[in-house]
């Protein structure tokens, strides 16, 4: 009896194993079929000439269909590797990512282009686009709703943008993009100065007078031609006054009066900015 039972048990195991194997094979076959169908869907442009594919990508970009345009530029870049068309596709791909809100992908794509094509005729545009990607960083929904000023955020993106524009203006002063880059550089400098003053004001209002004076002094030294210097000098004078340093206070106030004789800060002091709707303090 035991022998018979063992035999049946072995047969059942074999049968179960065979059925399991059959199911596994069936599932694998289905997976291969589905993958094939998926690849057929993804490869809808397989028979299209590369130049025609590029034209279609540009049409999508012109119509604002940035996601599809990016996918098509990726294929052009792969098919035309090592050609001028591939380089152009890379530039267009970075721009499509940028316009589609894919900042990280746009940045990595343009960085890759600059690294691989330092002598490209379009390198000036590459630097311009590299700066533009950081310059136009989106504040996001909360920033927009709260009315957050650009000068109140971390300025690393602005600093990166400034370096890209500076490289363009320095190396290619005759570039068609140089004048616009220079204007953006001026804007960035003013923004960076405003950021330093914003921090100095923050410290001053919290009675951290040494930190306030140091941050205001940094703004004055680094951004001498920025309008934000007016408030920076006033914060310096007031901070030194609170610290009991009359000579430094008088020096800062004298420079303020000489450069901004009609300064509103001398009349009104630090006027508190209106609070955003979400601020409870």
Image (cartoon, rainbow, N blue to C red):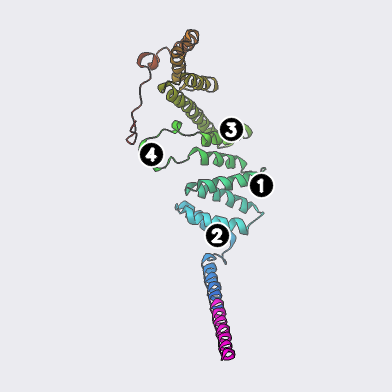
| Residue at image point 44% right, 33% down | 150
Q: Toward which corner of the image does residue 175 lie, by quadrant?
A: top right
Q: Residues within 10 Å of mark 4 (few under 14, many from 20)?
A: few
Q: Which residue is mark 3?
A: 166
Asked whether residue 120 is in view, the answer is no
Q: Residues within 10 Å of mark 2 (few under 14, many from 20)?
A: some
Report the Cα–Cα distance between label 4 and label 1: 37 Å
| Image: 251 above or below 128 | above
Report the Cα–Cα distance between label 2 and label 4: 38 Å
Q: Which mark is residue 116?
A: 1
Report the Cα–Cα distance between label 1 and label 2: 23 Å
Question: In terms of secondary structure, where does tag 2 sit?
Answer: helix
Q: Which residue is mark 4?
A: 144
| Mark sitting earlier along the chain (4/1) | 1
Asked whether residue 10 is in view, the answer is yes
Q: Main SS of the magenta segment?
A: helix
Q: Residues within 10 Å of mark 3 (few under 14, many from 20)?
A: many
User: Do tag 1 and tag 3 residues touch (Cβ < 8 Å)?
Assistant: no
Q: Which residue is mark 2?
A: 53
| Mark sitting earlier along the chain (3/2) | 2
| Image: 125 above or below 22 | above
User: Do tag 3 and tag 2 residues touch (Cβ < 8 Å)?
Assistant: no
Q: Nearer the viewer, residue 207 or 134?
A: 207
Badge nearest the viewer, 4 or 1: 4
Q: Residues within 10 Å of mark 1 (few under 14, many from 20)?
A: few
Question: In terms of secondary structure, where does tag 3 sit?
Answer: helix
| Mark sitting earlier along the chain (4/3) | 4
Q: Nearer the viewer, residue 265 or 80?
A: 265
Q: Which residues are magenta?
A: 1-24
| Mark sitting earlier along the chain (2/4) | 2
Residue 163 x, y percent position in the rendering: 58, 34
């Amino acid at each position: 009896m035991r022998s018979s039972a063992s035999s049946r048990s072995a047969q059942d195991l074999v049968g179960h194993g065979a059925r399991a194997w059959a199911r596994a094979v069936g599932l694998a076959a289905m997976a291969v079929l589905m993958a094939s169908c998926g690849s057929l869907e993804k490869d809808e442009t397989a028979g299209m000439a590369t130049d025609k594919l590029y034209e279609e990508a540009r049409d999508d970009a012109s119509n604002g269909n940035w996601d599809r345009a990016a996918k098509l530029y990726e294929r052009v870049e792969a098919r035309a590797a090592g050609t001028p068309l591939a380089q152009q596709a890379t530039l267009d791909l970075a721009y499509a990512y940028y316009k589609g809100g894919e900042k990280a992908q746009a940045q990595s794509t343009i960085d890759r282009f600059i690294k691989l094509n330092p002598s490209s005729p379009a390198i000036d545009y590459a630097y311009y686009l590299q700066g533009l990607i950081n310059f136009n960083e989106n504040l996001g929904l909360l920033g927009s709703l709260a009315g957050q000023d650009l000068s109140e955020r971390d300025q690393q993106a602005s600093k990166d943008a400034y370096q890209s524009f500076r490289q363009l203006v320095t190396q290619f002063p005759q570039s068609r993009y140089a004048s616009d880059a220079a204007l953006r550089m001026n804007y960035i400098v003013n923004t960076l100065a405003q950021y330093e003053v914003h921090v100095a004001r923050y410290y001053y209002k919290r009675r951290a007078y040494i930190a306030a004076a140091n941050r205001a002094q940094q703004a004055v030294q680094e951004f001498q031609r920025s309008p934000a210097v007016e408030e920076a000098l006033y914060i310096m004078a007031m901070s030194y006054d609170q610290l009991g340093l009359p000579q430094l206070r008088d020096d800062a106030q004298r420079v303020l009066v000489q450069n901004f004789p009609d300064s509103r800060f001398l009349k009104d002091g630090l006027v508190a900015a209106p609070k955003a709707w979400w601020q409870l303090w």
